[in-house]
Image (spheres, coloured by chain):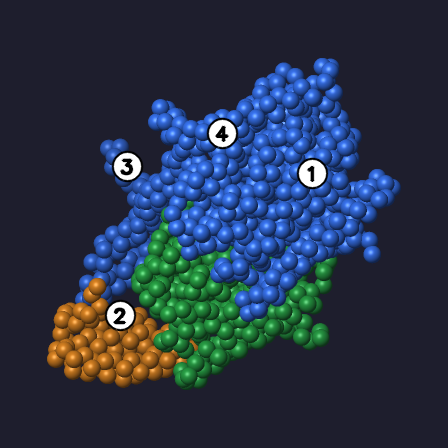
Chain colours: A blue, B orange, C green
Amino acid sequence: MNAIFYLWLIPLLPFAGFLFNGLLGRYLPKWLVTTVALLAPLAAFSMVLQISLGLSANQGALAALPFVHTCPFPWISVAALHIDFSFVLDQLSLVMLLVVTGVGFLIHIYSVGYMAHEEGYSRYFSYLNLFLFFMTVLVLAGNALLMFVGWEGVGLASYLLIGFYFQKDSGANAGKKAFIVNRIGDFGFLIGIFLLLANFGTLTFSEIAAKLASNPAWQGGVLTTIALCLLLGACGKSAQLPLYIWLPDAMEGPTPVSALIHAATMVTAGVYMIARTHVLFDHAPFALGVVAVIGAATALFAATIGLVQNDIKRVLAYSTISQLGYMFLGCGVAAYSAAIFHLMTHAFFKALLFLAAGSVIHAIGGEQDLRKMGGLWKKLPITFAVTTVGVLAIAGFFPFAGFFSKDAILYAAFVQGGSGRVLWFVGLLTALLTSFYMFRLWYLAFMGKPRSEGIHPHESPISMLGPLVILALLSIGGGWIGIERFAAYLSPSTGELHMESAIPHLELILSAVAVLVALLGWFIADQLYCRKPARPAQMAAALPGSYRLLANKYYVDEFYGATVVKPLLNISKYVLGWVVDVGILGGAAWLLAGIATFTGAILQRWQSGNLRSYAAWLAAGAAAVLLFVLVPWTTVWPVSMDLIGKVARH
Amino acid sequence: MNSILSQEVPISWYLMLSAVLFSLGVLGFLIKRNLITVFMSIELMLNAVNLSFVTFAHQWHQVRGQIFVFFVMMVAAAEAAVGLAIIIAVFRARATLAVDRIDLMKL
Amino acid sequence: MDAINQSILTLILLVPLAGALLVAVLPDRAKLPNWIALLTTLASFVLTLHLPIHFVLGQSGFQYEINRPWIESPVISYHVGVDGLSLWLVVLTGLLGPVGIIASWSAIAERRKVFYSLFLVQQTAMVGVFISLDLMLYYGFWELSLVPMAILIAMYGRKDGPKAALKFFLFTFIPSAPLLVAILWLYARTGSFDFATLQILIAHGNLPAAAMCWVAFAFLFAFAVKVPVFPLHGWLADTFSEAPVALAMVVAGKLGLYSMLRFHVGLFPVQARAAAPYLIALAVIGILYGACLALVQRDFWRLMAFAALSHLSLITLAIYGLTFTGWTGAIYQILNHGTVDAALFLLLGALEVRYGTSQINAYGGLAAKLPRAATFFVIATLAMIGLPMLNGFVGEFLILSSTFTGVSRSWTIAATLGVILGAAYMLWLVQRLFYGAESKLIASRPADDLHFREWVVLAPLTVLMLVMGLAPSIWTNSIQTGIHPPDLKGSAALPPSVLQISIHGEVQR
């Protein structure tokens, strides 16, 4: 069987797993839950693998991509509006699918060990399968609305998994925050969809691309608006400025969830979306510039916050935001394949780092504070080894995966010239900071002496270490394919990557600079956290203002709270609730009721209750009617007027 | 020479009588305080109307007016039955039949 | 089969009435009224299912039509029938019957005979509103639908029933008077109460324009209060917080919205077009206003009331967008709103029966104790806030996209913002009810998850939400047949813009 013809099975398998565990999981033995939960992503992954192997063996089939599979029954079909369930397989979605199902499967395995003793085991796995379903829908979607289905759906899965420990208020709050902030982004996406519909009359990506290709002079204008709307959506999902605030809080979820959803796959959906709709961005240079600026700014901004965080998962969260900034930067300089390349390697090493952090947390009984760790390398040798790989990869050391992909993005920015050089410099600075805080984490957690009493770290079970080792291998070798070959492979979907430069050996020089910068970061971390452990505290004391600013994450949450949330609630409650609803509208109703009551109170006196007064009124009324009927007013009136006139004249 | 007896009574006389009776009924209704007298005044008004019905029926040689009189008499009889029952009930409840003091309908 | 088709609508009308009679006659013993009412509503639901099954797709005009002269003078006939607009609304009413009975099962413990017979009368009245094609008949059912509601609110209100009932009564009865006057005026001018005849006569006839404005306004006003449209929603929150759950499910929305579509826009297209900009503005204000106020309510019934205001305003927006797709979306969204609100109300009612309060802050941490209730509630919430794959999204997308392309971009953006942020108050509600630590109140009562009769209703509703989200064509195909008013097509009295929009939809690029 050729798996490509059963494309729709890839999302549906995890969905079946979700239904099975979601409906029945509570009543079934654990082994059965586990088997079903693992089989679903395994089957999906093997299908993807078979497809990709089949394609790489057959150049003709590869050239025939994209393969479109459309459900015979349309989803929405009203008048001219026609939206199908259509799945598209091309190089881009294939790479993305490999990452999603591959890393997803590994994290499923890891979760078996990590969640073994948790309440709601089946609930957890059903959510995880649900996430895979929506993520694969997002990746395979052939039109913007179906992508939106996956887009909102992964948000839902994220909401459910962040709030997995719903008894904790912080967990429930974080889940809600993530969903609502994402919804602000989704608002942009939805408006973008409406604009697409209004301007192209279709939401199918290939048709939009065809229309744009047939009209190459169409630049900017409404396309910029569309691209910016989509960008707002991407910023929400991929935690970019100004909507990144939900991601650090999302660390309330179980750690494998942080690894899968909030590091490796879901948060990269924004990057994927920009790559998927890149033709629009290509026709809207201004929007593209905004993407680059947002990416660079986020990368630097999040990295500075990451410098001083003490929660191991929060450090990784800010580093995720920062790395996503790199990907946006890559997209912004039209190096989509470089961004996807970084997306892929980042999925490997960031999933690795999160899972390793999970292993550490698991080992020391749920502690996440870096200041209470230390000296763990002896107790957790394998975890230590793989973390080292992850740190080297994210810091961008040769020949680890991060080196190749980060380098590609920085190079692409540099060769743009002009403002590209600024972006390149910001990226380089971020690389320095990244290297520093990752080695800070490394030193604090694993080196030095244990800083807590009474903990007995133990290495994690094989189900957790296995995925770690595989991810470590991928973090080492994942970048060896090289950007040239990767870009060439992706070029049918993301367009050619133009990275020629007049300067000879530029790429080599830039790579060397990047590695030197990473070394510098390591050196500083080594100085501060290994050789002179008292220095960081002194520095913090010397610069209390900036330290507090960083430690409190630039007070962005507080800023949003004071400028958006509070006013919204207060206006709703006092202005709308009291003044408008109770005061004006309620008052108007009361006024009408009052007029009626008042009139009634006056007329009520008429109703004396005295029979004879009623009778008298009746008689008077009858007399009046008689008078009206009997007196010939039409003749009396002119005559009397005439008389009055005559009298007046005399 | 026609004696006054052989002549028909002019129709206006009947009508006058009817009007006088009706006015007496109205006046009694308004002036009297005893509920039973008030009630009798109503009967008087009904009969005044009956008189004019019969008059016109005779005048126009039509039977409808006389039929109507039967209706009115029936209504009057029913009314008498119900009305007197109410009056007795009121008297039992309030020990008075003075109209002025029966003002439960006052708001 | 023809015999059934000829009489099915009459049957659907009569079955609840017969049930009401039976409940009234038989003694109130051992849940007997409950069972009779349940069986009656189930039977009438099964009967309503006959309609879509034998509905002829692609045939415009009314089906299952019955037209018998009833009163000679004035000419009133028993004229009933359904088309795409009303078809599914009748089914929805049938569906909500048993759901309402189940929701009242243990909540209504006293004077059950009165409750269930009036409830069944209300069912008949609502179906009557949807199928009447004679304006006088329609008006009769319209009024009939208000009376049991007011009585039931007064008798079975939670704290302040009579006051809320009076408010509801005044708000909905007063606008009905001008409606009656307007209907009579039309009769005086045209000599007909028949919908189709009036439609033609109004389109071609030479009725005085100024008077027609007032007539159309009287229609609109009565409907707008019933929907309700901002700022006429004063009765909604009190009614929701007092009315028995089964009635709160049906009190707002569908009757008014359907009437707008059929009898305001349908009869007075010219006037409706003139009124549309104002109604669009009010609708968008209503969306945002309802969402904002829902954020700050402390009582979940009041929260649901403002949420309903927000959602119903969206449908109003769709109706007065006057686009083909928008109208389809509007009817579809009425169905969605009906099913989702039914599920949410059933659950909230179940919570109130168990814990005796509707104050949100008395709750907390219920998810661990009532996992099934929590699951159903979350799914219904997600449907309500328009998560794709569930039904709410399809309706919202149809409405917003058609309004965006066919009407006004800025208003649509504002409306979209309100719809999207609807997530905030609903998720916050979920969090305050179900998540976090157990509150004192919750901890003090034993866990009592959904009973069989509750989830046996909720499960089909939930499946329905999913199916309606994935395969809306099942519904939209037949809805669309109702959106080809044949008399509009040939009409010369209409400005061409109306024609174009209402027939070809928004695609005029």
Image depth: mark 4 or mark 2 in front:
4
Horizontal and vertical percent for residue C251? 46, 60
Quadrant where the C terminus of chain C lies? top right
How far apart are the two marked residues, 4 and 1, measured between alpha carbons?
26 Å
- Disc 4 target residue: A526
Which badge, 1 or 3, comes first in the chain's sequence?
A: 1
- Disc 1 target residue: A477
Image depth: mark 4 or mark 3 in front:
4
Left or right: C505, with A445 as reference point: right
- Disc 3 target residue: A646
Point 59% across, 42% down: residue: A386
- Disc 2 target residue: B19
Are marks 4 and 2 in one subunit?
Answer: no
Quadrant where the N terminus of chain C lies? bottom right
How far apart are the two marked residues, 1 and 3, measured between alpha carbons?
121 Å
Label 2: chain letter: B
Circle 3 SS class: helix
Between C309 and C506, the residue placed more toward the observer is C309
Label 1: chain letter: A
How far apart are the two marked residues, 4 and 3, measured between alpha carbons?
122 Å
Q: Residues within 10 Å of mark 1 (few under 14, many from 20)?
A: some
Horizontal and vertical percent for residue A628? 32, 55
Q: What kind of residue is marked 2?
A: Ala
Circle 1 SS class: helix
Q: Quick check: can you spot residue C179? A: no
